[in-house]
Image: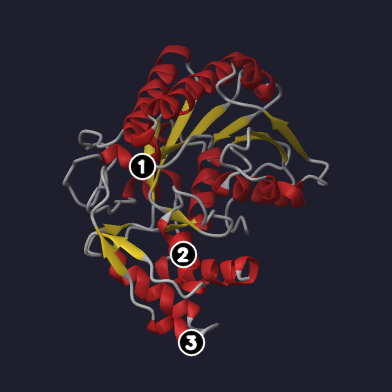
Amino acid sequence: MALNDIVLNKELHILVTGGAGFIGSNLCETLLENGNKVTCLDNFSTGKKENIEPLLSNGNFSLIEGDIRDLETCEKACQGVDYILHQAALGSVPRSIKDPITSNMVNVSGFLNMLVASKNAGVKRFIYAASSSTYGDSKQMPKIEEVIGKPLSPYAITKYVNELYADVFSKTYGIETIGLRYFNVFGKRQDPNGAYAAVIPKFVMQLMKHESPTINGDGSFSRDFTYIENVVEMNLRAIVTTNTEAVNTVYNVAFGERTDLNQLIGLLKKNLAKYDPSIAEIEPNYGPNRLGDVPHSLASIDKAKEKLGYAPKYDISKGLEKAVDWYWGNLKN
């Protein structure tokens, strides 16, 4: 991924927690391409070794296999680090509903461990993956950072607690923090398998197998789908900013456009039909709405544009084109 107009100091040592995951591995890859020293901390509960396999031979890359629920491991990972991109978490609303205790241990206790370790190590800035789920039952559209509702799932609670802890640590200990509220990120290396697979890779795999994807509800639920390179851009901008008013706050990370699930299926079929025309004829199935799902999600990205210079390059169409090309090239059997 290109850094474009972002000038990132090559001398920086950056820790990426959850670095073997979908978003984390894309961040590691870009930072190494820039010449940075990168440490990846991952316990491979959801991350995959193959995501970072090509990086292991890079002299600037080091892997710590460990769990953020262990403070000693977090302390070790933070030694000599300038910036932290904290991506490690147990994602998925349904997973958190099924097992709220583990989600809380990883997403809250693990997050607190990382904050304490960052403070103790004198890290310059702690940049963390927040979530659009924090908006909960707020009906305001588009979503602006300062107006949230009540969380609708254990996962959403954990991600909101992260923001509260980060705010307290910045005020109490002086550590700089930036939270990035991701909106439905998609792109290369996103896992299509398992009970908690995200909707885009799951639909792509089903269509490639000539199976009818199942949409929860009538397909009218909509999301601000966000291509991975836009997310990488925001993480880099959060590192390089020298604007004191841009830190110790949270930002939406999105494109700022809404796509419903019926439209999404149409775009996926169109892109996949370039490889296999028969996919264009596959029709989806419709099932019940999913517990804890928010009907609509659309982000305002004005704050990120104003304070960090965020300029997302990939709308849903451009992003899906690249993502589908990757899935076809890497996962088509």
Residue type indicated by callout 1: Pro
**Residue in view at x 50 percent, y 40 percent:** 238
Q: Which residue is mark 2?
A: 314
Label 1 sits on a secondary structure element that is helix
7 sits left or right of 264 in the view: right
Nearer to me, 222 or 240: 222
Label 3 sits on a secondary structure element that is helix
In the rendered image, residue 189, in percent from the top left (x then y), is placed at 59, 56
Rendered position, 22 above or below 172: below
Rendered position, 212 above or below 46: below
How crowded pointer 2 is (Cα within 10 Å; few <14, some 14-19, many 20+) is rated as: some
Nearer to me, 214 or 242: 214
**Residue 41, image quadrant:** top right
If the image is split into quadrants, where does the N terminus sit? bottom right
Residue 7 visible (yes or no): no
**Mark with earlier residue (3, 1):** 1
Q: Which residue is mark 3?
A: 277
**Mark with earlier residue (3, 2):** 3
**Residue in view at x 41 percent, y 66 percent:** 316
Rendered position, 98 above or below 116: below
**Mark with earlier residue (1, 2):** 1
Q: Which residue is mark 1?
A: 94
How crowded pointer 1 is (Cα within 10 Å; few <14, some 14-19, many 20+) is rated as: some
272 sits left or right of 257 in the view: right
> Marks 1 and 2: CB-CB under 8 Å?
no
